[in-house]
Image (tube, rainbow, N blue to C red):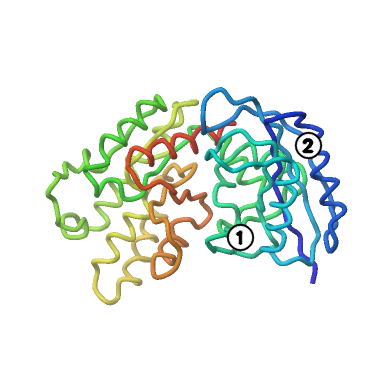
Amino acid sequence: MAKLAHIGLGSNLGDRKAILDGAVAQLQQTPELIVRSVSTYHETKPVGGPAGQGPFLNAAAVLETTLEPITLLHRLQEIEADAGRVRTVHWGERTLDLDVLLFGDEIIHTPELSVPHPRMGVRRFVLVPLEETTPDARDPLTGRSISELRANLDRRPSYLALKGWWEHPEKSPAYLRIVRELDGIGLSLRESLQLDDSHDCPLAVRFEPYELLERMVQWLDSRHWSGLGDQWLITDFSLREILLNVASHWTANWETQFWSLIARWNEQLPMPIQPTFLVYGIRSWGGPRDAEYNYLSRDLPCLRLESKAIDEEASEILTACAATRT
C-alpha cells in the first residue's frame, strides 16, 4: 500500500539549483515512487559545522511510494552519492543532503533511520519549505501539524528547557555558557531552591507537591516573560519533568494524586510559558525511558542529544537554538 513520505533536500556546494533539480529528476525516475509536489527553493545560512561554509538552498518534496522506509533511505543515499556527496565532516559542506522527514504516520527508531527526523521540529529551514508543500501534515510524535511546528519556532519569547540539568551540578558551567551565548535570561531551579551539590533529598520530600507546582508555575507565568522580545528564556528544568519527579515518590495511588494536582493547576494557577523545545539527554531508545520521553515530548519538540561530553552538549544545543531562527 502506497504511503506519503516527506523528504528534505539541501545543497551548499556547486551549482546548488542544478543539483536539487537533478535530485528531483532522479526521484521521478525511481520505480515505486511518485513525486507529488516540490517546494520552492529557500536560501538559508548554514547552522553548525565548520565556519566559512556557503549558504544552503533548501527544499522539501512529497513522495507517494510503496517502498519500505529503509529502502527509500538507501535510494536517497544513492542519489546523494551520484551528486558527489562525501560524508567526512559532521554538518560540513555538502553537494546534496536528502533526509526522510516523515513516512506516513510511522515512528521508527533504528541505528540507521529515525522517523520523524529527530531535528525536524527545531529546524526552521526544514519546516518552512515543508509547510509550503503540506501544511496540515502531522508529526506523529508531537501530534502537531507542520504549520503549528513552524509557528512554535516563530513564537516569542523563545524558551529552552533543559530537562534534568538542575540535578547535575557539573553541568552548571555549560548552562551558564548557553545563557551567555544566547544573551538570554536564565532561570535555575538549582539556584532558586538553593540546592547544594550534595543534595540527595527528593523534591517530593522537601516540598509539598502543590506548593512546589505553584512556585514553578509562578516563575514561568507567561505574563512575566511577554516583554522579552527576541531574547531566550533558559531553564535547567521542565515543568513536566518536575511533575514526574514528584509523582515518582508518591504512594501507590500516585496517578490519582497526579491528576488531582493537574486539576488544581488548571483551576487556580496562571498559564505557564511553553518551551520552544525541550532538551532530553537520553540518547538510546527502548525501555521504560521511552514512556517518559513520550510524556515529556507530547505536543512539544524534543531534542535528544548526540554528544557525550558536556561542553559538546552545550554546542549542540546552541546549534539547535540557531536553527529555530534560520
Q: Is residue 295 left or right of residue 2?
A: left
**Hey, what amino acid is under mark 2?**
Ile
Q: Is residue 107 left or right of residue 82?
A: left
- Judging depth in this view, the residue of 244 and 271 nearest the camera is 244
Q: Which residue is mark 2?
A: 19
**Image location (x, y in percent) of residue 273:** 44, 42
Q: Is residue 4 left or right of residue 217?
A: right
**Image location (x, y in percent) of residue 82:** 75, 45
Residue 99 vs 73, above or below: the answer is: above
> Which of the 4 quarters of the picture holds residue 228?
top left
Give the residue at x 28% y 66%. 248
Residue 295 vs 38, above or below: the answer is: below
Closer mark to the observer between disc 1 and disc 2: 2
Q: How many marks?
A: 2
For label 1, the crowd category at 10 Å Cα-Cα, with few meaning under 14, some 14 to 19 and many 20 or more, is some
Q: Is residue 282 left or right of residue 250?
A: right
Give the residue at x 68% y 63%. 69
Q: Quadrant where the N terminus lies?
A: bottom right
Which SS class for mark 2? helix
**Image location (x, y in percent) of residue 165:** 30, 46
Inter-mark Cα distance, 1 to 2: 31 Å
- Which of marks 2 and 1 precedes in the sequence? 2
Q: Give residue 163's mark.
A: none
- Judging depth in this view, the residue of 171 and 27 nearest the camera is 27
Give the residue at x 22% y 39%. 192
Q: Which residue is mark 1?
A: 140
**Hey, what amino acid is under mark 1?**
Pro
Which SS class for mark 1? loop
For label 2, the crowd category at 10 Å Cα-Cα, with few meaning under 14, some 14 to 19 and many 20 or more, is many
